Amino acid sequence: MTKLGFQLYCARNFPPLSDILKQVARAGYSEVEGYGGLYATLDEAGLKALRADLDANGLTMPTGHFGLDLLEKEPAQALLIAKTLGMVAIYCPFLMPDQRPSDAAGWFAFGQRLQEAGKRYQDAGYTFGWHNHDFEFKTLGDGSTPQEQILAGGPDLAWEADIAWLIRGGADPYGWIESYGKRITAVHVKDIAPAGENTDEDGWADVGYGTVPWKDLMAALRKTPAKHYVLEHDNPKDVERLLTRSIASFKTY
């Protein structure tokens, strides 16, 4: 059975982390995904303490999100984080609006930049890639999309496919899985609430309680090299509800 992990960013508003890790393990998860705000400021002792907390709860952190600044300017620190926490894959998760190119050439160059940044991590044995949001699927002046240009500019980049953001961007998930499935090494599993619902949770839903056709999508995604499926909800009101309902749904896919 495919395992479902948990992106710890979902629980950022529900400290302390030590309690969240217990909750995650209790709900039946064995993997978590890290994010920059969790470990970017930790020294070596802090990272070791986090690893010990993961170990104590029977959790691993095979994947992590790292901001572009850290990846490009502090590679030794990024590698220390990944090694200490036991990661196998590193994903750059976002580009701030004021840094986003406006044309195809700019996005292609950004893909080249990611490719260059990723070499040192790939050389160290890590999978390295890009995690999408919705802005990568807005059509550019030449008819292409930023996501196509990023993947063309960075031919060795892996893709952590956030399917719900892709759908929010107006794209067809099946088409993208078919065209770029070989690049997909991890997947964010999240759900979109029916129109007008869950406005206090930014329109997201627990997996199985929204409009994303996860059963059919999983059939398509299982044909890709994706090794890690990671539950995410950007703004949940109730972490316990999110954890328990989502894993129960996912087990039926």
Image (spheres, grey):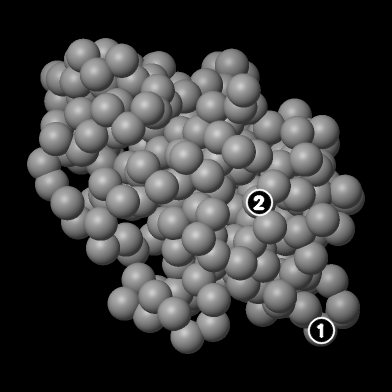
Count of marks placed on residues: 2
- Where does the image place residue 194, in percent across and percent down from the top left? 54, 76
Residue picked out by circle 1: 141
8 vs 174, left or right, is: left
Q: Quadrant of residue 227?
A: top right
> Given this view, does label 1 or label 2 mark the residue nearer the observer?
2
Is 226 located above or below residue 196 in the figure?
above
Q: Does residue 166 appear anywhere in the picture?
A: yes
Asked if the residues shown at circle 1 and circle 2 are in contact, with their CB atoms under 8 angstroms apart, the answer is no
Q: SS at mark 1?
A: loop
Name which of mark 1 and mark 2 comes first in the sequence.
1
- Where does the image place residue 121, in percent across and percent down from the top left? 55, 26
User: Which residue is at a point 46% across and 39% down the rendered structure image?
Assistant: 247
Is 75 located above or below residue 232 in the figure?
above
User: Which residue is at a point 15% across and 25% down the rendered structure image?
Assistant: 46
Residue 159 or residue 20, whichever sits in front: 20
Q: Quadrant of residue 17?
A: top left
Is 227 located above or below residue 199 in the figure?
above
Mark 2 burial class by Cα count in 10 Å: few <14, some 14-19, many 20+: many
- Where does the image place residue 97, in percent across and percent down from the top left? 49, 74
- Where does the image place residue 125, in percent across and percent down from the top left? 59, 16
User: Which residue is at a point 88% across and 50% down the rendered structure image?
Assistant: 179
Circle on res. 31 = none
The three-letter amino acid code for the residue at tag 1 is Gly
213 vs 22, left or right, is: right
243 vs 126, left or right, is: left
In the rendered view of the protein, which quadrant contains the C terminus? top right
Circle on res. 214 = 2
